[in-house]
Amino acid sequence: MMQNTLGIKIYAPALLDDGSRPVAVVHAMERVLPGLRLAWTVSESHQLMPLPQRDAWLAQARKGGGFQLVCKNDESFPVTMFDLGLSATGPGRQALFEVHAEVPLDTTVLTVAADMLAAVAEGGRALWGHATPFRASTEIAAQTVHPQMPETPPRGLPALKLPEKIRSPEIPHRLGWLNYWSAAAARVIGFPDPARDADLLSRARRTAMDGWVVQLTDTPLDLDNPTHLGALQDAYERFPEIGARMAP
């Protein structure tokens, strides 16, 4: 069976001439995960290639529109990070700085996962983001429905609109296991409400920049677990702004 992994995704406003944020998000990952050094990339011929001047390479790459994958040269503990470089895919077709990272979902990662998400998100000045196990993430991604090719989302989860159809960049496109909401994102979705969010607040923490990391379930999200599926459904019901909820 393939090892499950934890995918981290953050979404921030694009600053096309700013080379500091790619460096900041990579440093954030390395700071939180003990012993991590993302000092390699993959060449056009799919060969690992060292980056002796990695930070300068990252800064220059971002000025050109995006940075390629950086990784750890260790097959026993593969870690990758890259800027998806999608322009004009955010709300109102605004450009986004969208960073994806993937780490093995092991005991070490579990102990620092919330800190890692917060550090990467705030290093990139993200509006929102999430960290979700791969298996659950693929099903959550399938909630986004194209209006011209409607499909029924899995497991009775609500249908979500395409990102460009969401009215504000602060509104998260979807939920995940660990959710990062900046102060602006929390404000627009109405979190926290002490009267309604006691359960979520018991698994939430404030961040250094007054955002929130909100954990839906005590253990990594597993949609085969009815309790976990119910927690995800309840969170969508609580925050109808997320994904600009489509009518069934």
Image: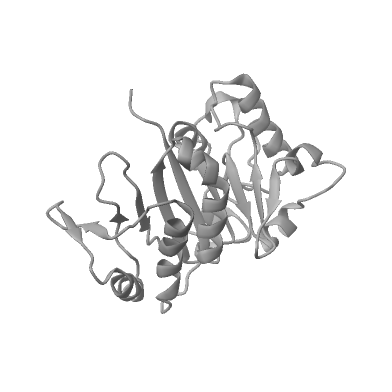
Q: Say whether residue 145 is visible.
A: no
Closest to the observer, 121 or 16:
121
Q: Coloured how?
A: one colour
Which residue ends up furthest to the right in the rendered image?
195
Q: Could you tell me how many numbered marks the image carries? A: 0
Q: Quadrant of the N terminus?
A: top left
User: In the image, what residue occupies the spot 49% across and 54% down?
Assistant: 32
Closest to the observer, 160 or 220:
220
Left or right? Give the position of 245 relative to 81.
right
Which residue ends up furthest to the left in the rendered image?
45
Left or right? Give the position of 81 relative to 156.
left
Q: Quadrant of the C terminus?
A: top right
User: In the image, what residue occupies the spot 83% across and 41% down?
Assistant: 196
Left or right? Give the position of 27 relative to 158.
left
Q: Say whether residue 168 is visible.
A: yes
**Against 173, is 246 above or below?**
above
Closest to the observer, 220 or 171:
220
x and y percent of residue 216 in the render?
Answer: 65, 37
x and y percent of residue 232 in the render?
Answer: 64, 33
x and y percent of residue 33 in the render?
Answer: 45, 51
**Against 61, is 234 above or below?**
above
User: In the image, what residue occupies the spot 43% across and 74% down?
Assistant: 20
Which residue ends up furthest to the bottom in the rendered image?
17
x and y percent of residue 116 in the render?
Answer: 52, 52
Closest to the observer, 208 or 147:
208
Q: Residue 149's image quarter?
A: top left
Left or right? Give the position of 238 relative to 221.
right
Q: Residue 220's image quarter?
A: top right
User: In the image, what residue occupies the spot 24% across and 50% down?
Assistant: 73
Q: Residue 24's image quarter?
A: bottom left
